[in-house]
Image: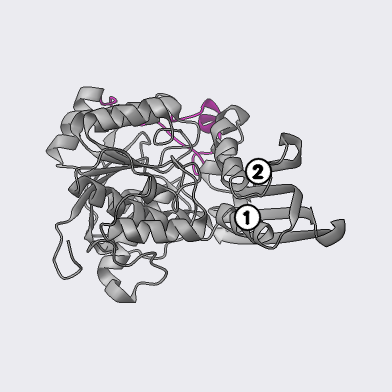
Amino acid sequence: MTSQTTPTPIRTVIVGVGNCASSLIQGVSYCKAMGDDAVGVSFPDLGGYRPQDIELVGGFDVDLRKVGKPLGEAAFAQPNCTEKFYTKLDDQTAQIYRGPDLDGVAWHMLQNPEDRSFRLSPEPAMSQAEVVDTLRNLKAEVMIIFLPVGSQKAVEFYVECALEAGVAVVNGIPVFIASHPVWAEKFRAAGVPILGDDFKAQFGATIVHRTLANLAKMRGVEIDRTYQLNVGGNTDFLNMTEQERLTNKRESKTEAVQAVLNNRLQDDDIRIGPSDYVPWLNDRKVAYVRMEGRLFGGARTNIEVRLDVEDSPNAAAEALVAIRLAKIAQDRAMAGPIADASAFLFKHPPEQIEDTDAHDVILNFAQGGEAGA
């Protein structure tokens, strides 16, 4: 496909219509309205596909304020609290369906104020067969997963549905699917591509931390210890106050940094992950990054960075890239984890590649070059 052709819309369903989904919904309509004048678009053209070629055809959620509503209305329903950067969403009329609860809703979330947490819909949850039928009826091509951190069973449920329906998957959260050998083989066997796992934000804490660590490595600086502490006020941070839901999140963020260090740090010398929930921050995330190390001759050095970002648009920007790459993989009849399309976008990809190289790998992949892995 060349950039001169007019591609067919990429029919996409969203699983979990929270803040990241809200930013994605806004982003699709924003890019359609603004075209080449849209601000902050990563990779405006990938294999002939542009962000405005994405068509959102359905969603799955469990919250009573979203189930049965169109995506354009649900994008701004409580407890979503992300920035409203584009509010003309009359074009986002696709319906939200009632998915199963499973472990997608932590018990403590139901005990918090309704404007900050989830309230379960009384509608009956769809079965796996019903979800598969819905995906087929919608003629869905790509499924993007934005469920709460720690939703292992829920993610696996939707992944099984996608495999049965032949829908490509973009896994935006730290449940390891693309990077897990058993799931990788299931996708290969089904002839379905998957990208993942766990988005790196467009300009977030992990990519900044990785860049600093890589700079230290290039300049011969020995890093001895580091931390990245994140606070925020959205439902994701409230959800992650339950420490049991954080195991994969900490591993994902930690490995993303360990992968670019010159020497792997001991567990006691690296601490990365969410540290507190501050309601008034809403969808803002504040990250504190510190690195301590040694220069020539063992002379000490340290650096501290404070990053303040709107969390969900930061992820949605990369989601717009991943959806298009998943469609490209599908067009080429590729199956299993798409390593070349994942390393730049995700914290825990099938294969870690240094970010500058991973950027070039994505462009090569989109242009039809031979896979590097």
Would you place residue 197 above or below residue 218 in this image? above
Q: Report the amino acid beneath label 2.
A: Ile
Q: Is residue 88 visible?
A: no
- Locate residue 298, reporting x and y percent: 86, 56
Quick one: SS at disc 1?
Answer: helix
- Locate residue 44, reporting x and y percent: 32, 67
Q: Nearer the viewer, residue 143 or 360?
A: 360
Quick one: SS at disc 2?
Answer: strand
Q: Report the amino acid beneath label 1.
A: His
Query: Disc 2 marks which residue?
Result: 272
- Residue 209's tag is 1
Mark 2 neighbour density, 10 Å: few (under 14) some (14–19) many (20 or more): many
- Our reading of the magenta stretch's main secondary structure is loop
Q: Nearer the viewer, residue 8 or 181?
A: 181
Please state the extent of the stretch shown in magenta in the rendering: 104-126
Image quarter of residue 309: bottom right
Whole-angstrom CA distance, mark 2 to mark 1, is 10 Å
Q: Is residue 145 magenta?
A: no
Would you place residue 122 above or below residue 146 in this image? above
Quadrant in which the N terminus appears: bottom left
Would you place residue 251 above or below residue 353 in this image? above
Mark 1 neighbour density, 10 Å: few (under 14) some (14–19) many (20 or more): many
Residue at 16 percent across and 30 percent down: it is 133
Q: Is residue 111 magenta?
A: yes
Residue at 78 percent across and 53 percent down: it is 292
Asked if residue 173 lies left or right of residue 229, the reply is: left
Image quarter of residue 153: top left
- Locate residue 234, reporting x and y percent: 53, 47
